[in-house]
Amino acid sequence: MSWDKVPISSVCKGIYDGPHATPPVSDSGAVFLGIPNFQNGRLDLSEIRYISEKDLPKWTKRVVPKPSDIVFSYEATLNLYAIIPEGFRGCLGRRMALIRVDSDKAYHKFLYYYFYSPAWRAVVAGNTVLGATVDRIPLIRFPSFEVELPPIEIQHRIADILSAYDDLIENNQKQIKLLEEAAQRLYKEWFVDLRFPGYEDAKISDGVPDGWKKCTLDTLGGFSRGKALTKADTMEGDIPVVAGGLEPAYFHNAAITEVPVITVSGSGANAGFTRMYYQKIWASDCSYIDSYKTENIFFIYCFLKCNKNTMDNLQKGSAQPHVYAKDINALPLFVPTDGLLQLFKSQVTPVYSLIANHTSSIEKLRQARDRLLPKLMSGEIKYKEVPI
């Protein structure tokens, strides 16, 4: 199969980069997109930074993001791509750029998937400028990067095949979000609003129920520092190596944790980012605690998610922020009675079991999609052979 190889500029109405600065923080307004909003090929807008209505016109002078635009990262964390969804209102953040596809010449969804192909990744790797602190793609050369495009009707067919996997992934993600919210609501109701079972008869002294103890987090189980593992030292395998980013840095053939495990990113722009893994991992540039170290893993996770601002404020260092295990362990909290902790565990364990099942389904769908994508893009598998 022979596809046309053309510069990306020939199928785009425009390629724009975002502002080279950061606007003042606002409590409301439009979305100021950031690198953390990229989540597995989609924009996750569950946690966003706002830009005020007053500042928005200044920060959208270059471009106003529209549905079907493709946003991507061009500095630091490369090869992040997502499509602007319907209803989005906001501006690009630092280190981000935008492609506006000419629909008469290319299908935006096909181009989006093409950006995940080995052919495109080779183009990016061949044009990456290695810096002392961060790597980057020179945007001045980006319009000349070549893409391989089939006729537009084939682009639609291939994109529809791959989109079917992403639609199933999105459905699972929605279920996970609902389950996470249910667990967090129960935590807040019981341990923040103090409307736990039997609260009507509980004696309260200085705002604290009798039997609850003021402690530090390590009373329930201490976080440990991960064990450094460079990519050069990894062995081929499927065990995630969790470092300072939002997603695993790479993979290995061995783990150092049990399941489930909570990680807190240790350094970089995402220092303090908290995540639960439902598979064994190698904890590297992060702090972690697993079910071997504590029987209250779900209570601890809910506590940390409920106190996200506190976690963000644990960052130390200006040039390279860090969050240390000792500071996480020193977080103050009121620990409920053993009976109430056990009751909470019994209530949320089935919820997190369902989350684990959905997470496993998502991973299987991603693997199937990612195996299919390069074969469709290279012509090894004919698009007509794949049912939707």
Image (spheres, rainbow, N blue to C red):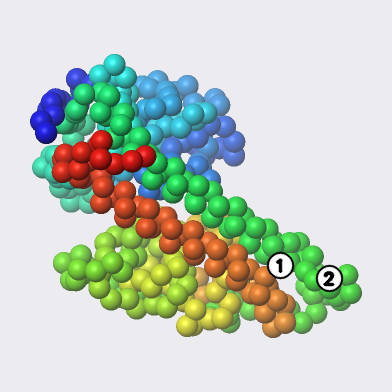
Which amino acid is tagged 2?
Answer: Tyr
Residue position marked by numbered label 2 in the rendering = 199
Gap between marks 1 and 2, in whole Å?
A: 11 Å
Horizontal side of residue 312 vs 132, given as left or right: right
- Residue 155: percent from the left, percent from the top? 27, 29
Residue position marked by numbered label 1 in the rendering = 191
Horizontal side of residue 50 vs 227, given as left or right: right
Quarter of the image holding residue 13?
A: top left
Residue drawn at x 32%, y 23% as measured from the top left: 100
> Looking at the image, can residue 326 be seen?
no
Give the position of the C terminus as an image quadrant: top left
Q: Secondary structure at mark 1?
A: helix
Q: Secondary structure at mark 2?
A: helix
Pointer 1 local density, CA inside 10 Å: few below 14, some 14–19, many at least 20: some
Which amino acid is tagged 1?
Answer: Phe
Tell me: residue 192, above or below residue 60.
Answer: below
Q: Tell me if label 1 and label 2 are in contact, CB under 8 Å.
A: no
Q: Earlier in the sequence, mark 1 or mark 2?
A: 1
Horizontal side of residue 268 vs 292, given as left or right: left
Nearer to me, 160 or 294: 160
- Residue 63: percent from the left, percent from the top? 38, 22
Residue drawn at x 43%, y 37% as measured from the top left: 33
Quarter of the image holding residue 350?
A: bottom right
Horizontal side of residue 17 vs 58, given as left or right: left
Nearer to me, 99 or 24: 99
Tell me: residue 34, above or below residue 301.
Answer: above
Pointer 2 local density, CA inside 10 Å: few below 14, some 14–19, many at least 20: few
Nearer to me, 290 or 95: 290
Residue drawn at x 30%, y 31% as measured from the top left: 157
- Residue 54: percent from the left, percent from the top? 54, 25
